[in-house]
Image (cartoon, grey):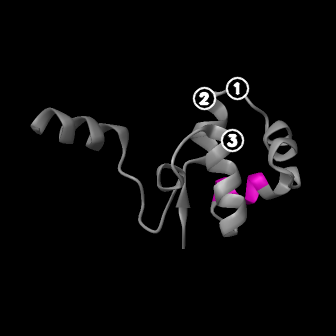
Amino acid sequence: MMYNRIKILRTERGLSRKELAEAVGVNFQTIGYLERGDYNASLELAFKLAEFFGVPVEAAFSPRPFKSLAEQLAARAAE
């Protein structure tokens, strides 16, 4: 199982699933499947999405669940 932040990245930018799908060349349903965790992106699609959002691929996809915002803030405060 791969985890991703596609929904967060998409909504932060005010994009619809359809707009994102058109930008990376997939069906809008694929974006929905990715966001729900029902589908794992191919390596090519993962790189396309990361490039579109301007983030490293590991910031958008991970084999482990992403830490919550509260956990990330607590870790930074402890540094």
Q: Nearer the viewer, residue 56 or 4?
A: 56
Helix, strand or loop at mark 2: helix
Question: Which residue occupies the extreme left position in the image?
Answer: 78
Please rate how many residues cluster around mark 3, counting C-alpha atoms within 10 Å: few if below 14, some from 14 to 19, many from 20.
Answer: few
Tell me the amino acid under the disc marked 2: Glu
Residue 29 x, y percent position in the rendering: 84, 55
Quarter holding residue 38: bottom right
Question: Which residue occupies the extreme top position in the image?
Answer: 14
Residue 41 visible in image: no
Task: Locate residue 67 relative to residue 27 in the image: left or right.
Answer: left
Q: Locate the C terminus by quadrant.
A: top left
Quarter holding residue 70: top left
Give the distance between the C-alpha atoms of the residues marked 3 and 1, in whole angstroms. 14 Å
Please rate how many residues cluster around mark 1, counting C-alpha atoms within 10 Å: few if below 14, some from 14 to 19, many from 20.
Answer: few
What residue did someone put label 3 on?
52
Please rate how many residues cluster around mark 2, counting C-alpha atoms within 10 Å: few if below 14, some from 14 to 19, many from 20.
Answer: few
On residue 12, which mark appears? 2
What residue did someone put label 1 on?
14
Q: Nearer the viewer, mark 3 or mark 1?
A: 3
Q: Residue at x 63, y 63 (%)?
A: 37
Give the distance between the C-alpha atoms of the residues marked 1 and 2, in whole angstroms. 6 Å
Q: Are marks 3 and 2 in contact (CB under 8 Å)?
A: no
Q: Residue at x 52, y 61 (%)?
A: 3
Quarter holding residue 46: bottom right
